Image: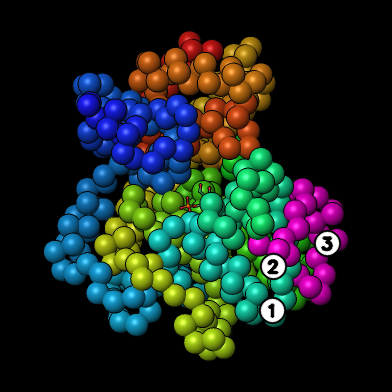
Amino acid sequence: MNNRQLFQQYVAQTSPAPIALDIVRASGNYLYTADGRQYLDLIGGISVCNIGHCHPAVVAAIQQQAATYLHVMVYGELVQSPQIQYAQALAAHLPAHLNCVYFTNSGAEATEGAIKLARRATGRADIIACNNSYHGNTLGALSVMGDEYWRNAFRPLMPGVWHCNYNSEELITSINEHTACVIIETIQAEAGIIEPNPDWLRRLRNRCTEAGALLIFDEIQCGFGRTGKLWGFEHYGIEPDIALLGKALGGGMPLGAFVASHELMQLFTHGPVLGHITTFGGHPVSCAAGLAGMQALLAENLIAQVAEKEALFHTLLTHPAIKAVRSKGLLLAIELDSSEAVIRALGKCLEQGLFSDWFLFAPQCIRIAPPLTITHAEIEYACGVLMGCL
Ligand code: PLP
């Protein structure tokens, strides 16, 4: 059997037709395959590889930590310097009250932990989430996901979850004395890049405070400079009670986190003790990699270049087949007529060395979320190929 057949035989599949490129190497903005081809990566591992693949500083940090210690003990018991250093760096770049980090293995686990913290802190059960939202695939995160197609086969789900439209008045008026938390993506990604109305976000914040409900912003996809600021919520001047981080957080290694105030996070230490535990969360190698990645992101001034790269995409993405281009920084959705048109275009792009994808709740849109290191020349090349494929 060749590698592709072995992959199909032995590795669990999640769709009938995986892309199945046989990757031998990834570096900077490119993926390299066993048949000697290279692909310009337009999705960065789905908003993970913001500083490009295998950044040398991240690789060095991994190598150094791997030679020092790997797993030593379950989360939260031993002092591990990669965790402390990264938590401190994150707190230094977050609003003052977001000063305590709980590291997880993934974004979904960050969602799970934050939901538990909100219930523990408020003593309330209800959770308000948005239609077309994505917060992960574990059962709790799936329960707050806003799409019936992906939820329905796995019922019964977590009770007490109410879904409203993003940006809707209904969401704000639904918050009451039973609401533990409202969880939203700061900028909806899988819905095909939908921004919050700033006034709605402000009123949502005020209503949560008034009702004693916690506000959770999922920054897992829009964080780490993707939208042109370090955090998506910085665009609107509104701060959450809990921020969810993931994807680019680990610099390419598996890592998630939920960040809250020290006072809130202390609730996990009693009633019950060990209120939220994990074996591998905050793995020292992941934390070392993540810190090196964040330092590189900031040192290389990548975030400041996002707006002009976004503008260049907009200038070059002109074709009668394009119905709309929505974006926030280097998180773009190119809307076509149908999901079939998207699949056709993506197939042709792949043949020509461009790697892209669609969105879960917007299959009529092409996803563009390249490493922030993508160059102007690469954007010009990518848009040229893309226009040809349309
Ligand atoms: N939240 C958002 C906005 C996401 O985009 C994702 C993943 O795509 C998650 C949560 C879940 O993260 P993970 O796949 O690491 O569990």
Task: Look at mark 2 in the image and give the residue it sits on.
Answer: 181
Q: Is residue 8 left or right of residue 91?
A: left
Question: Marks 2 and 1: in contact by CB < 8 Å?
Answer: yes
Q: Disc 1 designates what residue?
A: 122
Q: Earlier in the sequence, mark 1 or mark 2?
A: 1
82 or 66: nearer the viewer: 66
Residue closer to the observer: 156 or 246: 156
Q: Note whether residue 346 is visible.
A: yes
CA gap between label 3 and label 1 equals: 17 Å
Disc 3 Cβ-to-ligand 1 distance below 8 Å: no
Q: Is residue 126 left or right of residue 363?
A: right
| x and y percentages locating residue 175 in the rendered image | 80, 65
Q: Quick one: which residue is furthest to the left in this view?
A: 67
**Label ID, residue 329:** none
Relative to the observer, which residue lies in front, 269 or 354?
269
Q: Which residue is mark 3?
A: 174
Asked if the magenta segment contains residue 170, the reply would be: yes
Quarter assignment of residue 128: bottom right
Give the extent of the magenta segment: 158-179
What distance separates the C-alpha of mark 1 from that of mark 2? Answer: 9 Å
Label located before the other in sequence (3 or 1)? 1
Which of the 4 image quarters holds residue 49? top left
Magenta stretch: includes residue 146? no
Amino acid tagged 3: Ser
Residue at image position (42%, 30%) is: 18
Q: Secondary structure at mark 2?
A: strand
Horizontal and vertical percent position of residue 88: 39, 72
Three-letter code, disc 1: Thr
Q: Is mark 2 within 8 Å of ligand 1?
A: no
Q: Residues within 10 Å of mark 1 (few under 14, many from 20)?
A: some
Instruction: Identify the secondary structure beneath mark 1.
Output: helix
